[in-house]
Structures are given as structure tokens and as C-alpha cells.
Image (cartoon, rainbow, N blue to C red):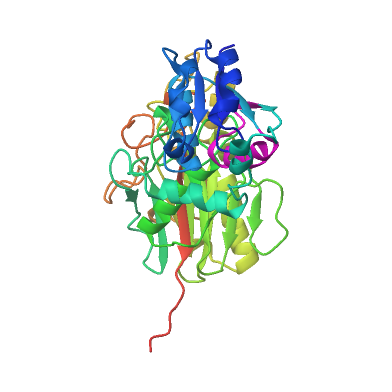
């Protein structure tokens, strides 16, 4: 398996002492020197071992930028195994950067080499990079200065939800994620994909600034493709696909990348909810479970609750096995257009609407693709690659958009 080799000159090795290491590795196709500011005052690129070799020098202004550019190159080469030659101190510091800028999709193998205590150059390089918060601040500062990709941050908003609430549905533009299927405003970090935690946090920060809830964080549901609902303020379960609250300035978020992000708002009782409804969650009734939690826990009237269904896969692009399709056919025959085919097309949005209406939600209080007299908030994610992420279209390395909602606080006028 091909690997990238990263030789750390920042944390304890001078160019003279690393020559023997380079001689052992220079013949390999993907060798990188981590130099940073060290490059400006030393001659690491002048060593004879580099002459005619394919060694790449990372000599950007900060360690964070060096490692970010290294990651971009590694991703471009589709590599996931990284061998790091470093000192004991280097391993400690570089693992902090690794946690922020990489995911478990990469494997790091640290080969720790003892620093030559007799070499004055090596001794002078040791213990210069402060770990912890300084690393986090350096990474955040780097990501905040990156240009937005694919245009500005844009969101969709339901005209049904009144102005006492802040809300929206994100699209894929305006973030800093560069992996093609995750570019650019991916809002969820998975250990199985290549978009790291720090990049996703920067995307969330940019969304918050655009939507007006910065610096409040997004409170995501913990997806389990089921129907459990957390009432904020009670003990938080390990997983849940719905969340409800009456607290102001708390931003609820439901992810989606074909699954439906569903927002619930009661302007009379001032209660909100958010749910993630995929085909499994729809069959299990997660939307009505969220409504029932609003009614039971906060005394909401079902007739007052407004529901907005965000970007999600349409029946044009979504198919299931025949047995699963039969479950939707039982909800209503119109939920399945071609039941006799091997993989029938299924309309999970229509099923969601029917179940909500059966539970007492007024038809005119549901903003989805069937409400054609208002601006659309429920386009098909699979049909619009320029605007939305889609698992159906992009496969397992898909990005995530979100629906978000909060109760605006009542500010006393002076």
C-alpha cells in the first residue's frame, strides 16, 4: 500500500541530522519535509540528498498551514497511510494537529527518533511549539482566512415560519471543504470521511454568521434512524432523531443528505423541534413523535404547530426494495409509483405529510414540495448537485446540509 512519509524538521531535528533519514526514504514516491518557519533560517532544501529527488518541502508560515497543505496533497493522491518521522515532543504536538485536521479515515504511524543531545541545532529547535489551546487557535485562524468555495453561503427559508423564530436550510455553497463530494459547506464530520472536525466547525461558524445565530452552537440530533425524541433539559439519550425545547437562543439542527430535515414551530406556545426523517424514521413515525413531545411536554396544540420540510431526495430519484416499498404503499398507494418493479420509486415526503395530517397537523401548516404557492424549501437533493449534497447521488463519501431553528430572545428596548 502506498504511503506518505512526513519528516518533521520543526520539532527537534535539524537538516544535518535528518540527512541519513532522507537517504533511507528519498527513493519513496511521496516524501515530505515539514519545515515551516524553520526553512527561512536553515538550508534543508539545499542538502544533496534532495537533489533530483521527489521530496516535497512544506515551508508555509505556520505548522497548521503546512499540515493543511500536506493533507490537500495527500487527498489529491488518494493516500490514507502516513508515516511520521519525528521526536517525542513532535509526536505530542503533531497528534494535536492530527485530531483537528484529519479523521480516522487516515492512519498515522509515528516513528519516534531520539533527538541528538550533542547537536546544538537540534537542541535549539526543541520545545518551541506550544501544544493545546495554541494549536487550536492556530488551526482556527488558518481556516478562517481561507476563501469560500463555490460562492457565498446561501440558505432556504420557509415563509410559513414567523419572524419570532430564526431558521433556515443550508445549501452546499460558501464553505471551505475541498473534497469534491464534500465541497464546500459540509456540516458534519464523520470518522469514515476525509473532512476533519476543524473544517466542519469552520463551516458551521460561517453558516452561523450568515444566518444570524453566531456564536451559538448548533445542537444536532444524534441520528439513529429511529423515532426517539429528546426533550432538552431532561437526561440526554445516547441517540435520538428528534429534539424539542422552549428555550430561547438554543439552535436546534437536523442533518440531511437525502433524508428530510424537518423543523417544527409553535408560535403560540413558543416551542420548537427538529427531526431527522429518513425512510426508516418516516416509517417509525419520528415526525409525529416530535409533535407528540411538543404537546406532552409543553402543552402545545397540534393545530398551532407549523412544519417545514427541507431539501431531501424526491420520488424521482429514491428507490427501495419491494418489501420496504410495500410499507410505504400501506401508508398510501400514492407513496409508491411503480410497486411492481424490482426497486420501486418511493415518495418519503408524501408519506411524511400523510402521517402528520393523520396526527392532526393542518395541511396548510406543512411546507413541503406539495405547497406550490410558496417558495420551495424542499427541492430534490439528488437532482441539484450544484446546490445540495446527496447520498443517493454521491455514494458513501457524501456531505451533509442541515435544517436549523431557534427561538429569538425578547430584547428589552432601552
Q: Quadrant of the C terminus?
A: bottom left
In the rendered image, residue 107, in percent from the top left (x then y), is placed at 63, 25
Q: Is residue 318 visible?
A: no
**Dominant secondary-structure state across the stretch colored magenta:** helix
Looking at the picture, tell me which residue is in the foreground, 22 or 163. Answer: 22
Q: Is residue 392 left or right of residue 225?
A: left
Q: Quadrant of the N terminus?
A: top right
Quadrant of the image occupied by residue 393: top left
Write the residue at 71% across / 51% down. 237
Q: Report the label total.
A: 0
Looking at the picture, tell me which residue is in the foreground, 169 or 52. Answer: 52
Q: Is residue 102 magenta?
A: yes
Q: Is residue 289 magenta?
A: no
Write the residue at 42% across / 30% down. 179
In the rendered image, residue 75, in percent from the top left (x then y), is placed at 47, 25
Q: Which residues are magenta?
A: 87-109
Residue ranking furthest to the bottom? 414
In the rendered image, residue 227, in percent from the top left (x then y), is placed at 63, 45
In the rendered image, residue 360, in percent from the top left (x then y), is placed at 51, 55
Write the residue at 60% across / 63% down. 295
Amino acid at each position: 500500500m502506498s504511503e506518505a512519509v512526513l519528516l518533521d524538521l520543526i520539532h527537534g531535528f535539524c537538516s544535518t541530522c535528518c540527512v541519513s533519514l532522507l537517504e533511507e526514504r528519498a527513493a519513496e514516491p511521496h516524501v515530505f519535509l515539514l519545515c515551516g518557519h524553520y526553512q527561512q533560517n536553515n538550508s534543508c532544501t539545499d542538502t544533496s540528498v534532495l537533489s533530483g529527488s521527489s521530496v516535497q518541502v512544506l515551508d508555509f508560515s505556520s505548522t497548521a498551514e503546512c499540515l493543511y497543505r500536506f493533507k490537500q496533497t495527500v487527498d489529491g493522491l488518494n493516500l490514507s497511510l502516513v508515516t511520521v518521522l519525528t521526536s517525542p515532543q513532535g509526536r505530542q504536538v503533531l497528534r494535536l494537529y492530527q485530531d483537528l485536521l484529519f479523521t480516522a479515515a487516515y492512519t498515522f504511524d509515528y516513528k519516534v527518533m531520539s533527538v541528538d543531545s550533542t547537536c546544538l541545532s537540534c537542541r535549539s529547535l526543541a520545545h518551541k511549539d506550544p501544544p493545546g489551546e495554541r494549536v487550536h487557535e492556530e488551526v482556527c485562524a488558518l481556516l478562517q482566512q481561507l476563501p469560500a468555495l463555490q460562492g457565498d453561503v446561501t440558505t432556504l427559508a420557509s415563509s410559513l415560519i414567523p419572524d419570532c423564530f430564526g431558521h433556515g436550510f443550508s445549501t452546499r455553497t460558501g464553505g471551505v471543504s475541498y473534497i469534491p463530494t464534500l465541497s464546500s459547506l459540509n456540516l458534519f464530520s464523520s470518522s469514515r470521511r476525509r473532512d476533519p472536525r476543524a473544517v466542519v466547525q469552520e463551516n458551521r461558524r460561517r453558516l452561523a454568521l450568515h444566518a444570524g445565530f453566531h456564536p451559538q452552537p448548533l445542537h444536532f440530533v444524534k441520528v439513529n434512524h429511529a423515532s426517539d425524541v429528546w426533550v432538552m433539559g431532561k437526561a440526554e439519550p445516547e441517540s435520538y432523531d428528534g429534539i424539542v425545547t422552549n428555550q430561547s437562543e438554543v439552535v436546534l439542527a437536523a442533518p440531511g443528505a437525502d433524508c428530510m430535515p424537518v423543523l417544527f414551530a409553535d408560535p403560540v406556545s413558543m416551542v420548537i423541534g427538529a427531526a431527522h426523517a429518513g425512510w426508516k424514521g418516516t416509517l417509525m413515525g419520528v415526525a409525529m413523535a416530535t409533535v407528540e413531545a411538543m404537546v406532552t411536554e409543553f402543552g402545545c396544540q397540534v393545530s398551532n404547530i407549523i412544519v417545514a420540510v427541507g431539501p431531501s431526495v424526491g420520488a424521482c430519484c429514491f428507490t427501495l426494495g419491494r418489501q420496504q416499498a410495500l410499507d410505504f404503499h400501506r401508508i398510501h398507494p400514492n407513496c409508491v409509483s411503480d410497486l411492481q418493479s424490482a426497486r420501486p420509486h418511493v415518495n418519503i415526503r408524501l408519506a411524511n405529510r400523510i402521517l402528520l395530517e393523520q396526527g392532526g397537523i393542518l395541511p396548510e401548516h406543512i411546507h413541503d414540495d406539495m405547497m406550490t404557492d410558496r417558495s420551495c424549501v424542499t427541492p430534490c437533493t439528488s437532482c441539484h448537485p450544484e446546490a445540495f449534497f446527496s447520498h443517493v447521488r454521491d455514494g458513501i463519501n457524501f456531505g451533509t446540509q442541515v435544517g436549523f431553528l431557534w427561538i429569538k430572545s425578547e430584547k428589552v428596548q432601552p
